[in-house]
Amino acid sequence: MSASPLWLRRAVLVGVALALVVLTATASNGGATGSRVLVIGDSILHLSQPDVTAALSAEGWQPVVDGRPGLSIETFEPIVASDAAIARPDVAVVELGTNDCDTTCDNLGPAIDTVMDQLVSHGARAVYWLNVQTAPTRLLPGPPRVYPAHADYVNYAIEQAAVRWPQMKVVDFRDLFDQHPEWHLADGLHPNAIGQQELATLIAATIHR
């Protein structure tokens, strides 16, 4: 059998080299291709922003983390496009919903769809959305109450959106943090220093898998 032409052997070597580069990049991020990650959220993420940024950077990601106190899914809608245009995320994480559904829940599904559309259209191939806590909180004077008032409906809307969007996966933030009141500040909702580290660990471990 005659030897392969030189150009063919070179093409094969180049192909093998490129495959190794892709496999190495994929392995470094736990199976997710690319290294850019956008994390958006409300005051829970805002408090945890340094820990989340450090945890993701340690895993080899290039994170853009934007936590905005008091914002709901609806009020974050106009911001998502600009965040996504800057980050150009391969993967996105969303921690929103705690400030929703306090008075009305009518626009929750369409608002989630708008956020998802912006993230996916700017390149996110996977979006991990944290559900909301349901533990009693002391944000206002008086007896403890569940915040948001309709937390179960918020979580139901998030679950239903995951059915509509194959790129979306729900992260069980509620189950983990509801079991650990010691991870919260006195209001029972926002994470303390330990809770901030635990949230960062949860996010990093989720997108690593």
Image (cartoon, grey):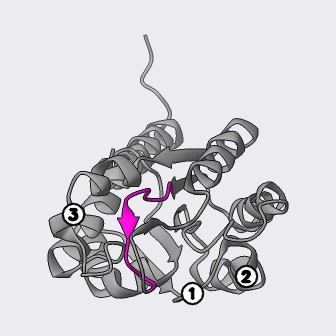
Q: Nearer the viewer, mark 3 or mark 2?
A: 3
Task: Choose top left, top right, bottom left or bottom right for residue 167.
Answer: top right
Tell me the quarter of the image containing the C terminus.
top left
Residue 133 lies in the magenta-colored region:
yes
Answer whether residue 185 is visible to the viewer in this image. yes
Residue found at x 59% / y 66%: 97
Marks 2/1: CA distance?
A: 9 Å
Callouts 2 and 1 close, C-beta under 8 Å: yes
Choose the circle earlier in sequence order: 2 or 1.
1
Residue 48 lies in the magenta-colored region:
no
- Give the labeled residue for mark 1: 70
Q: Magenta region: which residues? A: 130-140
Callouts 3 and 2 close, C-beta under 8 Å: no
Residue found at x 34% / y 77%: 190
- Give the labeled residue for mark 3: 181
Choose the circle earlier in sequence order: 3 or 2.
2
Marks 3/1: CA distance?
A: 21 Å
Q: Nearer the viewer, residue 128 or 138?
A: 138
Task: Choose top left, top right, bottom left or bottom right for residue 71.
Answer: bottom right
Instruction: State left or right for residue 190 relative to residue 123.
Output: left
Is 176 situated above or below 195? above
Q: Nearer the viewer, residue 153 or 157?
A: 153
